[in-house]
Amino acid sequence: MIAKAIATRPGRVLALLFAANLLNFYDRTLPAVLAEPIRIAWGLSDVHIGLVGAAFTLAYALAGLPLGRMADTRSRKWIIAIGLVIWSLLTGVNGLVTGFTTLLIVRIGIGLGEAAFAPGANALIADLYPSERRGRATGIMMLGLPIGMILAFFTTGAIAEYFGTWRAPFFIAMIPGLIVAALFMLIREPERGATDAKVANPVRIDRPIRTLLSIPTFWLIIASGVTFTFAGYATTTFMVPNLQRFFGLSLTEAALSVGVIVGVTGLIALPLGGLIADKLHGRFRRGRLMFGAGCMAMSAILTVVALSQPAHQVELFIGLFAAGWFFQYVYFTTAYPAIHDVVPPQLRATAIAVFFAMFYILGAAFGPLIVGVLSDQVAGDAMRTAGASEMTEAFRAIGLHASLSIVPVMLLITSALIVLAALRFSHDSQVARK
């Protein structure tokens, strides 16, 4: 009875996808919140912090390819549930690490577990909701991103300070994932292509990757994903340290501020952006993507203005950066649904896996790493310019804040790539329906 009730009500399946996505982003955000105490405890550099993020995302991206193909041919609910168990248990293990090497290994394992979620989840949404409702459904599932970040940024600092150790939040984060994994085992999956027009004799696709990579719109959305996630992961990795170093906030104050920037904004932007994107898509074939391109350009402008603020204008910096991040969230409700429209239904999970693999390997992995390298280099230049012989936190603050200037550049490139994708969208979406 329970399994049937969940299976016949898309809203219940969507609620579980939201919960899993929340935990996905909560668990992956913990190292970003705790970056400074971990760095100081083990004497690490910003390059080390960037390497932790890069290792996680590379594991996530590479594992996503075979898991995405499996999600197109096997049970999506079991793939998601097993992934939840793996990443939740390893999050608890993260609290036991004794140094940089063990931290790196555990984060790789968590990346492998989390890779099981996105391909199957996005494919399930495409089979639960028709094209004209997928932007809103994707927006609801993606609400797990800001809410997960809000919980991580709002609670992690307080938990660490209460227990007197940065290890405590990892232990607490382990439990909810095991519960949600058990609930996933109760759902009954929809038929693949259930919300699309029925094809009498569907063509068997023997070379799925080659088929996907022959779709120009898909390639352009991948490229936009690379630049988008470069900017996003560089920001979430280093924004708490930036607020602590450059603006002088405490760990708790910085974490709460970043929770507002990357979390609270999404609570409004995702459902509103999904609603507007779907309405524009219903009126203009290119409307959804052009809306996304405009929002990325606005985000770039607001981010530039935010980064130009001096150290004593922390409130203005937070407000402007949050406004820019608000517009960034529209990417999820415009680019993701467009992928489902231009690829065959039997390749949707594989398409999401390829999409995620490319933008995580080339964007999310390199974003934190490159910003970390730039930060250390600019800090070194500032030290030498000042004639000092020892690296101080003041020089590190200058280096990190300056290195974040690469973020709005990547957002502007994202906007241009989405415009190009919109120009190809009508043709490729018609081909996909044949």
Image (cartoon, rainbow, N blue to C red):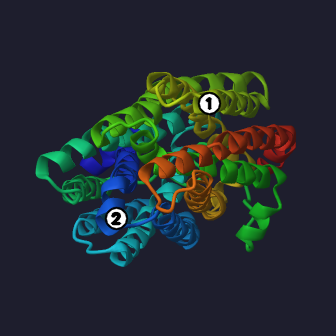
Q: Position of residue 164 (x, y in %)?
A: 14, 53
Q: Which circle marks residue 409 in the picture?
A: none
Specify whether residue 179 is in view: yes
**Residue 17 drawn above or below residue 41:** above
**Label 1: few (<14), some or many (≥20) within 10 Å?**
few
- Binning the other alpha carbons within 10 Å of mark 2 as few (below 14), some (14 to 19) or many (20 upward) gives many
First along the sequence among labels 1 and 2: 2
Label 1 SS: loop
Mark 2 belongs to which amino acid?
Trp
- Depth check: give the residue in front, 66 or 380: 380
Q: Compared to 135, does 186 lie above or below?
A: below
Tell me the quarter of the picture where residue 281 sits.
top right
Q: What's the amino acid at mark 1?
A: Ser
Q: Residue furthest front?
A: 387
Q: Nearer the viewer, mark 1 or mark 2?
A: 1
Q: What residue appears at the point 59 percent right and 42 percent down from the top-left corner?
A: 195
Task: Give percent across and percent down for residue 291.
Answer: 71, 27
Q: Secondary structure at mark 2?
A: helix
Residue 308's disc number: 1
Residue farthest along the left direction in this orientation:
163
**Distance (Cα) linking label 1 and label 2:** 38 Å
Q: Dot 2 corresponds to which residue?
A: 87
User: Residue at (49%, 69%) from the top-left corner?
Assistant: 55
Residue 26 placed where, x, y %?
35, 49
Query: Which of the two residues, 321 or 195, is positioned nearer the viewer here?
Result: 321
| Residue at figure coordinates x 43%, y 35% from the top left | 247
Q: Are marks 1 and 2 in contact (CB under 8 Å)?
A: no
- Left or right, residue 433 beside residue 394: right
Residue at 38%, 37% (x, y): give it: 248
